[in-house]
Amino acid sequence: QLQLVESGGGSVHSGGSLRLSCAASGFSLMHYAIAWFRQAPGKEREGVSTISAFGGQTNYANSVKGRFTISKDNAKNTVYLQMNSLKPEDTGVYSCAAAYGSSWYHQPPGLTNEYEYDYWGQGTQVTVPS
């Protein structure tokens, strides 16, 4: 069974940190670009960060630039999202998604190109109380 499983969410005070993990099972992430998306209550899902399949290119939404870091460990078949200086507006369900193909080896899909992603995880809740 091919799946992505997120973990590491929780409730943290404003200014705190969390590290999310996205682990793949049933397939290798080596040829997949990975993205993190989030959805806050009552809002549309938005792209947070992406990383190319080979890990050389990353992109971030302006709202998280300088605070979040995405990384990819192909040996562990896992992608991470380190989130620092968390704010209440970072609250939401965070999901990872994988896009397959050589097109994404060196440049990931855009943050708004959800249709490019083949597999999605179920999500993990991040709460930063105001």
Image: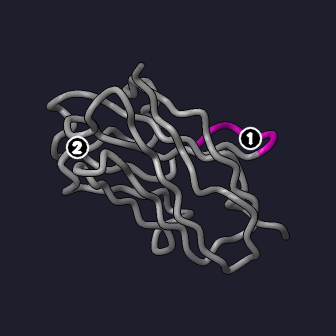
Characterize the local packing of mark 1: few (<14), some (14-19) or many (20 or more) Cα atoms within 10 angstroms: few
Q: Front-most of 36 and 111?
A: 36
Q: Is residue 17 left or right of residue 127?
A: left
> Where the C terminus falls, by quadrant?
bottom right
- The amino acid pointed to by label 1 is Lys
Q: What's the residue at 50%, 62% (across, down)?
A: 62
Give how far across and how far down residue 86 sits, in percent: 65, 72
The residue singled out by tag 2 in the image is 53
Residue 108 image point, x, y percent: 28, 43
Q: Which labelled disc corresponds to residue 43?
A: 1
Q: Residue at x 53, y 33 (%)?
A: 121
Q: Is 90 drawn above or below residue 41 in the view shown?
A: below
Q: Which residues are magenta?
A: 41-46
Residue at the farthest top position:
1
**From the viewer's perspective, is 22 left or right of 56?**
right
Q: Name which residue type carries label 2.
A: Ala
Asked whether residue 14 is drawn in magenta, I would say no
